[in-house]
Amino acid sequence: MRSNLQTTALVAGLMLIGPAAASAQPPPIDGVTGSLALEGGVEKTYEGVNTLVVKTLDGIEHLFHLTERTVVHGGNAAGDDVLRGLDEGSKVVVHYTIDGEHKTADEVDRLGENGLTTVEGVITKVDRRAKTMSIQLADGSRQTLHFTERAAANVGSDVAGGTTRVVVYVNDEAGRAIAHFFKRSS
């Protein structure tokens, strides 16, 4: 049985450890740098605090903070009006960075009507220097897509021509198909 002095010492020790443990940051994940991206639907927007809740395809909700630098593709607003056009139910891809548990949306790509469209095919060539990707579509035709800076930075060495089947989210900008995001498809 513990004495009152032992119990007091244990509680005091836990009180000292508690704040340090609570403020400790998780260790960095090897190989994860830059921004991350996820796909989902807008659940809720909070204009007063510039935040956005996105529910991913697997049902998990994520809270994102938007800044004056957040860019929305497929929308017609920036800066203070960045949430305009991101209605509940809108399909989006959010590119974000993490600082502790704080997720900041760097870029939001609206999908579907008035947003980015999809192109599906097999990658035939990736030119990282020119920031382009060529894909063969189901009808046998080929299309060359230009990457955004963010998409170019996220093209890993595991993406090989001739074998990787992808869905690419594109926007027509100045007469060129620009790839904003792509993912492997089955």
Image (tube, rainbow, N blue to C red):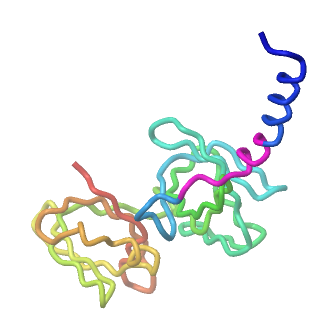
The residue most toward the bottom is: 130
Instruction: Judge from the rendering whether residue 74 lies leftward or rightward of residue 186; answer left or right.
Output: right
User: What's drawn in magenta, residue-wise?
Assistant: 17-27
Q: Find residue 147 and report its image quarter.
A: bottom left
Magenta span: helix, strand or loop, mainly?
A: helix
Residue 93 in picture, x, y percent from top left: 50, 57
Residue drawn at point x = 79 percent, y = 45 percent? 19
Above or below residue 48? Residue 35 is below
Residue 139 inside the magenta-drawn segment: no
| Quadrant of the drawing holding the N terminus | top right
Residue 91 in picture, x, y percent from top left: 51, 51
Residue 138 in picture, x, y percent from top left: 14, 60
Instruction: Judge from the rendering whether residue 106 lies leftward or rightward of residue 125; answer left or right.
Output: right
Above or below residue 10? Residue 63 is below
Above or below residue 177? Residue 130 is below
Front position in the image: 160 or 99: 99
The residue most toward the top is: 1
Front position in the image: 141 or 10: 10
Give the tally of numbered discs: 0
Residue 179 in picture, x, y percent from top left: 38, 73
Q: Find residue 118 and report its image quarter.
A: bottom left
Front position in the image: 15 or 2: 2
Residue drawn at point x = 43 percent, y = 79 percent? 148
Residue drawn at point x = 43 percent, y = 62 percent? 30
Q: Find residue 76 and report its image quarter.
A: bottom right
Instruction: Judge from the rendering whether residue 91 lies leftward or rightward of residue 180; answer left or right.
Output: right
